[in-house]
Amino acid sequence: MGPEPELSLADQVAEQAELIVNTLQQTDYQYTENIDAGNGIYDCDCSQFANFVLSQVAPDHYATLVAAAGEPVPRAFDYYRFVSSLPAEAGDGWEQVQVLADVARGDLIAWQLFSQPEPGHDTGHVVFVAGPPTLTDQGSFAVRVYDSAIVPHFDDTRGDDPGQWPSGVGSGFINFQAGDDGQPVAFQFSPPLSSPFTWLPIAIGRLA
């Protein structure tokens, strides 16, 4: 047998995020970052988790993001603005994915809540994609993600069961709706299935 094929950078990012989810010892969603990887502690918000994973696995790509954000610690809206400005073909190691059905493991999905984010408030959300989307009976796309979230998603590793953390770093499904052109237009963040979708501009980025 020959050597194992080398993982793509996107796969390496997903592997790192999955490893953290599977081995963490403490996590809580909070705006003041407290990440101690050696002890498995990940108290952070979504962008701090994304920053940590990218800086560890893809430092050059992360540096490009930081430069575009114009601040040393990118926030969720910085991810959305950066990803939404990417070309469809690789530029500086990044590219934008236009069609939700084409999303793949290791991609980033981000959205922005406000055009003028305020300090100390949620600015949006950013996640790593765990695998390709599946079409649900409701006609939406279910995408398993790795992220830090304040509430669990669908079929989530976070929750009220013993041994689970109610918030922080974990993995679950977010449901997305796509427009006629295939681009994501809305998301359903957490149960129940009857909860409304949130309609916001959504962007998908890929490490190339």
Image (spheres, grey):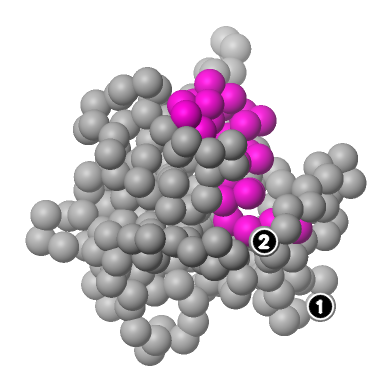
Mark 2, other Cα within 10 Å: few <14 / some 14–19 / many ≥20: some
Callout 2 touching callout 1 (CB < 8 Å): no
Q: Amino acid at mark 2?
A: Tyr
Q: Nearer the viewer, residue 144 or 59?
A: 59
Q: Does the magenta run of residues contain 65?
A: yes
Task: Please state, as top left, top right, bottom left or bottom right, where the C terminus lies in the image.
Answer: top left
Q: Which mark is residue 162?
A: 1
Quick one: label 1, few (<14), some, or many (20+) residues within 10 Å?
A: few
Q: Which residues are magenta?
A: 42-67
54 up-or-down from 78: above or below:
above
Residue 95 coordinates in the image, percent (x, y): 31, 31
Give me the residue at 22% from left, 48% from top. Answer: 99
Image quarter hosting the N terminus: top right
Name the secondary structure under disc 2: loop
In terms of sequence position, does the residue under pointer 2 or pointer 1 come before the other? Answer: 2
Which residue occupies 32% across, 50% down?
Answer: 203
